[in-house]
């Protein structure tokens, strides 16, 4: 899976056609798709209930850590070497991570109950039926859509907003864009610890999303930044 990511990013670095770039990005999204269910399954099968929030937090830390590093790195590469370099460097960084993941997951096994093919099909059909009629399942889906809309909306919108909307120079936009994800890093650690300790998953989710809403509302009322960060003064 990660090898496919690497190949697709290299291909995007060599691409000069907009349509091909979009197709490759869609393929990259498809290749990224199995990561979340696979990671959740590994956590569920290898950690007890009282540790699952913290175990999930450890692999989810990749999002804020990656964004905190990736934003300034990508914008520096873009400003210094051109847009193609961002794809090549990210593809290169995938290789050592792929090796670490391969070594680290060698002993991981997902428990599968032995059963007949017909029984397995019947069980899956019954499980799907039970899942789709459960209101809890749909609430979780809505929550996840809201969370990812906020998260990846910030990913795509914030750098452009800082540069074009607030006049911040590209040199400063990278580390300013990473600041929310540095804060997210602390929030994930604290939230996972509290979730396991008090065992109130829904309350933890509500508090996190409410905090995000308050923060975004406050950001929309901020004034233009000081001249030190504006591109027309550098």
Image: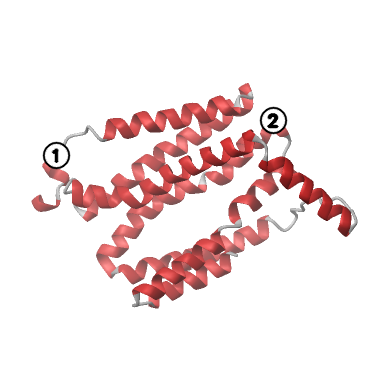
The spot of residue 31 in percent (x, y) is 56, 64
Residue most extreme to the left: 233
Q: Nearer the viewer, residue 227 or 30?
A: 30
Question: What residue lies at 64% left-to-right and 24% top-to-bottom?
Answer: 199
Residue 103's label in the rendered image is none
Vertical arrangement, residue 121 with respect to residue 194, above or below: below
| Count of number-bearing discs | 2
Q: Residue 119 at x, y = what percent?
A: 88, 53
Q: Secondary structure at mark 2?
A: helix
Where is residue 194? Give x, y as percent. Answer: 57, 26
In the picture, measured across the screen, residue 168 lies left or right of residue 47, that is left
Placement of 216 over or under 42, stated as above or below: above
Disc 2 to disc 1, how far (Cα)?
A: 47 Å
Residue bearing the label numbered 2 = 50
Identity of the residue drawn at 18% across and 45% down: 166
Q: Which residue is mark 1?
A: 226
The residue located at (35%, 59%) in the rendering is 74
Residue at left offset 50%, top offset 65%: 28
Query: For this view, does 24 lie left or right of residue 174?
Result: right
Which of the two discs, 2 and 1, labels the residue nearer the N terminus?
Answer: 2
Secondary structure beneath dot 1 equals loop
Quadrant (top left/top right/bottom left/bottom right) for the N terminus: bottom right
Is 65 positioned to the left or the right of 47 in the image?
left
Q: How dense is the environment of label 2, judged by Cα within 10 Å: few (below 14), some, or many (20 and up)? A: few
């Amino acid at each position: 899976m990660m090898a496919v990511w690497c190949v697709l990013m290299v291909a995007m670095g060599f691409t000069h056609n907009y349509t091909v770039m979009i197709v490759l990005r869609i393929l990259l999204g498809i290749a990224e798709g199995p990561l979340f269910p696979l990671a959740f399954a590994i956590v569920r099968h290898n950690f007890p209930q009282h540790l699952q929030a913290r175990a999930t937090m450890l692999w989810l830390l990749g999002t804020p850590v990656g964004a905190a590093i990736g934003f300034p790195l990508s914008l520096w590469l873009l400003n210094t070497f051109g847009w193609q370099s961002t794809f090549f460097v990210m593809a290169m960084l995938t290789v050592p991570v792929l090796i670490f993941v391969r070594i680290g997951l060698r002993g991981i096994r997902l428990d599968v109950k032995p059963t007949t093919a017909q029984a397995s099909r019947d069980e899956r059909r019954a499980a799907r039926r039970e899942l789709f009629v459960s209101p809890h399942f749909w609430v979780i889906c809505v929550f996840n859509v809201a969370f990812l809309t906020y998260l990846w909306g910030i990913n795509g919108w914030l750098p452009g907003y800082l540069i074009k909307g607030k006049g911040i120079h590209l040199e400063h936009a990278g580390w300013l864009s990473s600041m929310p994800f540095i804060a997210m890093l602390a929030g994930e650690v604290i939230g996972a610890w509290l979730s396991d300790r008090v065992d109130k998953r829904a309350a933890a989710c509500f508090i996190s999303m409410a905090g995000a809403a308050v923060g975004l509302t406050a950001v929309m009322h901020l004034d233009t930044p000081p001249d030190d960060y504006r591109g027309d003064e550098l």
